[in-house]
């Protein structure tokens, strides 16, 4: 077997937190018919079939089944795994078991890759939120896969140096970016401009960070990834395998890695039977003596970077304008309604920023009266989110003399912070209108923040929030963001009780 030719296929598997925080349920989503909601539909079309992907013989019968997750690099959004653990436990367990099996297959370097907690656009977050997102993502990974992560996926591959710095400080060794996010490369003592996707994607790079730290970066093969996602390469798994091998180019004595990255939902949801094509490609690659199927961690262990790269900050894999898709009417949209505008994006973000920033003072001042270190407690609150005992948590983080009322306030303050993180889930801006499902998701998280602040802190932030939302205009009708909130969020504020399965035990 060649020791210099490697292939890695990466899938980004993710769904937003679809649960209504006021009910704890995802609810019926008619657009997902015949399934009750999109999580159920995509699980049936993609997540579950990839655990037993069929490879057909010449007579059309099934001759082999593969758990694709054992062989392909996979980052998993924590909010997806949280839902899956409860609602699709068999599929969830097969995902976890696949990583365990891959550790043996790839010399201790599993296929699972960590993911920041809830798919917020990191360059648009403040430093404190970036840190919490990273620490929560790592903690969730350890909880589910029973090991420390080697790498971490950035939502939409949206990147800046501060995020990379915080990841490296937390022990993350690498991330994966689009080739168009590379600015220049240092090789042999000279810097070369690689803007426009000109970077050689077949080798890893070191990105130098503040304070002498660094992180490894893999820039995936952009054109081939696009063909897999959108241009029919998945119609035949053998063709996919051949294209991956061809992308290695001619041998030059140096270890080369052909690797691609797409949404994991490509394999079965976006493309029917895509999981079967993936399984066939895996089989062909494993049978090819000239290449070796690998993971990013395994490749790095044997072939650390010898080149240095600079990134283009404030860029992503899904917005030609950097990261404006999540804050402005930049022109990026789904293509379903080209005549619509997305001016509402800026107002939605401004409204959420108003809530987040206004509540910092309460969290710090009132939090200091009930917690030893409020921000350290927030970083550790993932323990409660993952099902840990609130009382045990408070024994560590609350002031020793705190009574029941003070301990309850501590949990309320932390729950507000948790929901304030969830309201920045990127899907709220990705699509075409503020009245869409995903925008309503983030508005409902904001509604929970407002409701709890009113009850726990005796503060009513809703008027100021609605004043900003009133500037957002829907393309669908004459409604504003204020109208969407009052119609889609306010009616669900029923009892003020925590939703079933919510992490907070404060009420």
Image: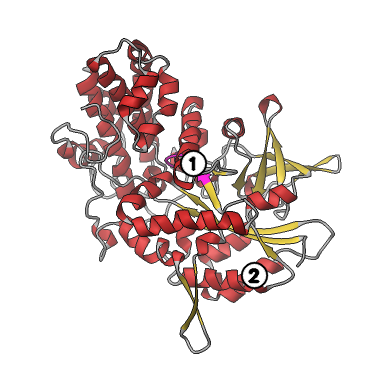
In front here: 292 or 389? Answer: 389
What is the basis of the colouring in this image? secondary structure
Q: In front of the other: label 1 or label 2?
A: 1
Where on the picture, by quarter, is residue 493? top left
Q: Is residue 241 left or right of residue 44?
A: right
Residue 11 in view here: no
Q: Give the farthest residue toward the bottom.
A: 59
Question: Residue drawn at (66%, 40%), measured in percent from left and top?
Answer: 311
Q: Which residue is mark 2?
A: 285
Q: Which residues are magenta?
A: 114-121
Query: In x, y percent, where is residue 244?
Result: 65, 66
In front here: 183 or 51? Answer: 51
Q: Which residue is mark 1?
A: 142
Q: Give the farthest residue toward the left.
A: 495
Where on the picture, by quarter, is residue 491? top left
Q: Label 1 neighbourhood size at 10 Å, few (<14), some (14-19), many (20+)? A: some
In front here: 259 or 233? Answer: 259
Q: CA distance from mark 1 to mark 2?
A: 30 Å
Say how many tags the image has. 2
- Magenta includes 118? yes
């Amino acid at each position: 077997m060649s020791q210099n030719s490697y292939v890695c296929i990466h899938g980004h598997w993710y769904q937003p937190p679809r649960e209504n925080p006021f009910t704890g349920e995802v609810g019926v989503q008619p657009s997902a018919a015949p399934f009750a909601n999109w999580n159920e539909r995509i699980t049936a079309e993609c997540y579950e079939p990839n655990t037993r992907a069929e490879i057909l013989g010449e007579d059309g019968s099934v001759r082999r089944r593969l758990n694709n997750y054992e062989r392909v690099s996979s980052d998993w959004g924590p909010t997806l795994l949280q839902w899956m653990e409860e609602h699709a436990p068999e599929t969830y367990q097969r995902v976890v078991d696949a990583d365990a099996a891959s550790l043996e297959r790839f010399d201790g370097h599993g296929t699972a890759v960590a993911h920041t907690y809830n798919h917020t656009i990191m360059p648009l977050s403040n430093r404190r939120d970036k840190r919490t997102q990273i620490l929560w993502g790592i903690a969730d990974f350890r909880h589910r896969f029973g090991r420390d992560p080697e790498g971490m996926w950035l939502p939409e591959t949206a990147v800046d140096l501060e995020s990379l710095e915080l990841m490296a400080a937390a022990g993350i060794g690498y991330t994966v970016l689009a080739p168009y996010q590379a600015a220049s490369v240092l090789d042999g003592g000279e810097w070369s401009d690689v803007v426009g996707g000109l970077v050689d994607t077949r080798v890893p790079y070191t990105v130098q960070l503040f304070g002498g730290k660094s992180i490894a970066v893999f820039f995936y093969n952009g054109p081939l990834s696009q063909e897999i996602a959108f241009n029919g390469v998945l119609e035949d798994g053998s063709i996919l395998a051949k294209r991956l091998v061809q992308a290695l180019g001619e041998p030059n004595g140096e270890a080369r890695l052909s690797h691609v990255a797409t949404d994991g939902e490509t394999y079965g949801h976006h493309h029917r039977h895509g999981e079967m094509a993936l399984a066939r490609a895996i089989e062909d690659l494993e049978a090819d003596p000239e290449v070796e199927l690998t993971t990013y961690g395994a490749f790095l262990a044997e072939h650390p970077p010898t080149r240095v790269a600079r990134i283009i900050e404030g860029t992503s894999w899904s917005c030609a304008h950097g990261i404006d898709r999540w804050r402005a009417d930049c022109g990026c949209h789904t293509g379903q309604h080209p005549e619509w505008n997305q001016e509402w994006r800026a107002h939605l973000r401004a409204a959420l920023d108003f809530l987040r920033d206004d509540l910092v003072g309460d969290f710090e001042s009132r939090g200091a009266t009930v917690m030893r270190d409020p921000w350290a407690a927030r970083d550790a609150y993932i323990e409660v989110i993952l099902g840990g005992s609130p009382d045990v948590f408070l024994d560590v983080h609350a002031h020793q003399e705190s009574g029941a009322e003070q301990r309850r306030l501590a949990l309320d303050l932390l729950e507000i912070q948790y929901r304030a993180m969830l309201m920045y889930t990127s899907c709220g801006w990705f699509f075409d209108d503020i009245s869409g499902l995903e925008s309503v998701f983030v508005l409902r998280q904001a509604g929970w923040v407002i409701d709890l602040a009113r009850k726990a802190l005796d503060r009513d932030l809703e008027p100021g929030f609605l004043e900003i939302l009133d500037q957002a205009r829907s393309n669908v009708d004459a409604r504003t963001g204020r109208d969407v909130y009052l119609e889609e969020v306010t009616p669900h504020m029923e009892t003020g009780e925590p939703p079933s399965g919510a992490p907070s035990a404060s009420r």
